[in-house]
Image: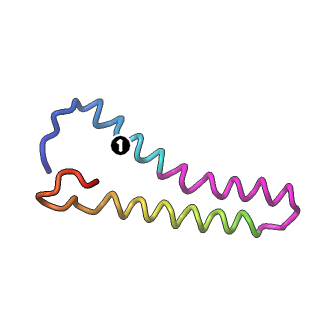
Amino acid sequence: MNKSSRSSAAEAYHWVSIVTTVTLEMVLPAYGGSLLDKRWSTGSALVTTGACLGMLVAITHLLQLTKKPPSGNKKSS
């Protein structure tokens, strides 16, 4: 792992931001589905759909975070 030029506090805030983002990606679709289920009286169909969608988005995001950037390509347009 490369030594970062950022301070340890900046690194911590970076990781807190990533964890918060992934958490919200999982929770908000299910919460939105819950609200819509109550409004439209659809049982638990939309909360289940929201939870599945949120998990799919979060897992995709986590997989993208684990991929290493291609060597020699600093920035892609």
Left or right: residue 11 compared with residue 21: left
The picture quadrant where one finds residue 43 is bottom right
Residue 14: within the magenta?
Answer: no
Q: Residue at x 70, y 54 (%)?
A: 32
Q: Is residue 19 above or below residue 5?
A: below
Residue 34: within the magenta?
Answer: yes
Magenta stretch: helix, strand or loop mostly: helix
The span shown in magenta is 22-44
The picture quadrant where one finds residue 12 is top left
Residue 44 in the image: state x and y as whole percent: 78, 67
Q: Residue at x 39, y 60 (%)?
A: 62
- In the depicted view, which residue is nearer to us: 40 or 47? 40
Number of dots carrying numbers: 1
Residue 51 in the image: state x and y as whole percent: 63, 63
Q: Amino acid at mark 1?
A: Trp
Q: Residues within 10 Å of mark 1 (few under 14, many from 20)?
A: few
Q: Is residue 5 above or below residue 77?
A: above
Left or right: residue 22 compared with residue 40: left
Q: Residue at x 42, y 59 (%)?
A: 61
Residue 26 in the image: state x and y as whole percent: 55, 57
| Residue beneath disc 1 | 15
Please identify the residue farthest to the right as the structure is shown: 41
Q: Residue at x 67, y 68 (%)?
A: 49
Local secondary structure at mark 1: helix
Left or right: residue 40 compared with residue 16: right
Residue 2 in the image: state x and y as whole percent: 12, 47
Q: Is residue 76 above or below residue 15?
A: below
Q: Is residue 28 above or below residue 53?
A: above
Left or right: residue 52 compared with residue 57: right
